Amino acid sequence: KQEVTQIPAALSVPEGENLVLNCSFTDSAIYNLQWFRQDPGKGLTSLLLIQSSQREQTSGRLNASLDKSSGRSTLYIAASQPGDSATYLCASVVASKIIFGSGTRLSIRP
Amino acid sequence: EAGVTQFPSHSVIEKGQTVTLRCDPISGHDNLYWYRRVMGKEIKFLLHFVKESKQDESGMPNNRFLAERTGGTYSTLKVQPAELEDSGVYFCASSRTGGNTGELFFGEGSRLTVL
């Protein structure tokens, strides 16, 4: 049974710092992995989707990597801004079943 | 292009009552998913439609939950009778291609409070 874990559960850093959010999964037979952000009281916004054949995806200041052999994905945020404050979730797809991690609550201090 | 829309945004009902949540996926998306997040827990899969057919409903908690997608467009999720533990946020998502490779687009969620 696939389990997805995100560490840390919460993170607070000063504005301008680069940071890394971690996601680990137990079943390496994933089809893809997707990173989302959720703002309080809002839905999930897709950030990056990495297919199983890919190793990384980039969008602006965000870079997500995928290492299936070690069961890990990281989301790198460069030059963090207060507007990046949100909860970040990763979700893995295994045989059409989508499993979410519990999220990392990120706070960027001005 | 309109995103995934859900209605209502918030519903407060008493234990034993019935509630119906609605989801309108992005036009042209054959795949529709329901998820829920109960207090303090991670988001969990409920079920997956491909057009009007239930592809996977293994996440449905019990027979008090009924999901339909007549005509393969919008979907409803009915909870009858509602129990206290059903409180949470119910998310709907859609994708153009199947869950194996398709990017998911989520609605804002419907918050259900059962008193």
Image (tube, coloured by chain):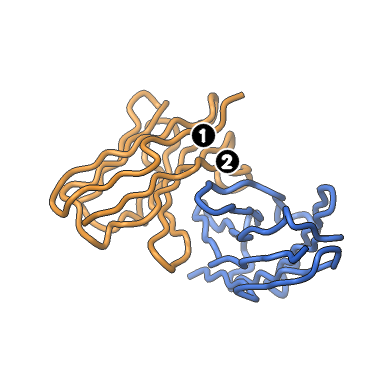
Chain colours: A blue, B orange
Decide if residue B52 is on the left or right side of residue B12: right
The chain letter under disc 2 is B
Callout 1 amino acid: Val
Dot 1: few (<14), some (14–19), or many (≥20) neighbours within 10 Å?
many
Decide if residue A54 is on the left or right side of residue A23: right
Circle 1 — which element? Answer: loop
Q: Residue at x 30, y 44 (%)?
A: B11
Would you say the residues marked 1 and 2 are in contact, meaning their CB atoms lie under 8 Å apart?
yes
Asked if A30 appears above or below B81 in the picture, the reply is: below
Residue bearing mark 2: B105
Asked if A43 appears above or below A30 in the picture, the reply is: above
Decide if residue B16 is on the left or right side of residue B57: left
Reading the chain from its start, which is encountered first: label 1 or label 2? 1
Callout 2 amino acid: Phe
Extreme-front residue of the structure: A110
Residue bearing mark 1: B4
Q: Residue at x 53, y 67 (%)?
A: A102
In which quadrant will I find the C terminus of chain A? bottom right
Asked if A36 appears above or below A73 in the picture, the reply is: above
**Location of residue A105 in the rendering, given as x and y in whole percent from the top left corner:** 61, 66
Decide if residue B17 is on the left or right side of residue A12: left
Circle 2 — which element? Answer: strand
